[in-house]
Amino acid sequence: MRPDAAHTVAVLDAVRGKGPRVHCLTNSVARAFTANVLLAIGAVPSMSHEAPEVGAFVENADALLVNLGTLDAAMRAAMMAAIGAAEARGLPWILDPVFADRSAARAAFADELLARQPAALRLNEAEAAALGAGNLDAARRVGTIVAQTGEIDRISGPHAACDVALGDPLMRQVTAMGCALGAVIAAFIAVSDNRFSGVCAAVHVFGAAGSLAGSRAAGPGSFVPAFLDALFTLDAASFAELEKGR
């Protein structure tokens, strides 16, 4: 099925109204862009990755992003502390197993974290293959929503699936796009009663902003500000504009 634009706008408005705090344990390449994306949708980012204080940041957040992009021993320790704090508070957390396909050790760590039942998993086709269909099926059965991005983004849960066919090829020319999507998913889950519909709405918003930005940009340099502006101004009229262009 396709996501409903009216529902997507309603969830986006909830993010803008509530300003959920998303603590991001993300890679060094993605931090600034991810923070700006969260601000553009009305969420509040924090980025501390020091193990001694990360628990305090998570305790004051509404959702947690765990992104494996630049993984080292200190970041692993921070991730374990942050996930423990999120579990203690019952906060949703999102796993993004970046480059799990490039390293057996990283894939094993991603498997370990996936077993702790994140609210959602954001990954691409190669990372999905590295984790394995069996692991992904097991994650869905216990309630983890899987958002696999690609030419068509597919969101799947234990009982439903949703496809989003939006975005622009320039998104592949800008670093940290997928990483920022993980943070947007965290923000949307934080304000959603239904995790599946929250993830669908997040991916829908991200793809719509990509489509709008791509129609206005001359290349990757102008795409980034156009993308942030599209996220900031996205509304029902924006989705109507996209529908006309289909």
Image: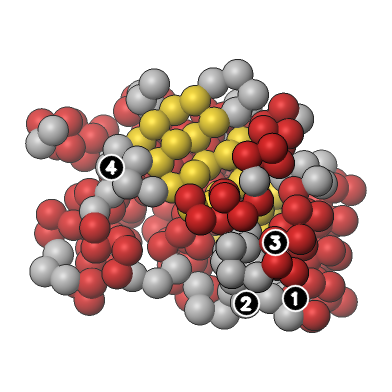
Judging from the image, the colouring scheme is secondary structure
In terms of sequence position, does the residue under pointer 4 or pointer 3 come before the other? 3
Residue 30 x %, y %: 50, 73
Is the C-beta separation of discs 2 and 4 under 8 Å? no
Element at label 4: loop
In terms of sequence position, does the residue under pointer 3 or pointer 2 come before the other? 2
Tell me the tag on residue 166: 4
Tell me the tag on residue 107: 3
Q: Name the residue under label 2.
A: 70
How far separated are the C-alphas under marks 1 and 2? 8 Å
Q: How crowded is mark 1: few (under 14 residues within 10 Å), some or many (20 or more)?
A: many
Along the line of sight, which residue is nearer the eye, 42 or 195? 195
Q: Which residue is drawn at 82% across and 42% down?
A: 90
How far separated are the C-alphas under marks 2 and 4? 28 Å
Residue 154 vs 177, above or below: the answer is: above
131 relative position to 174: left or right: right
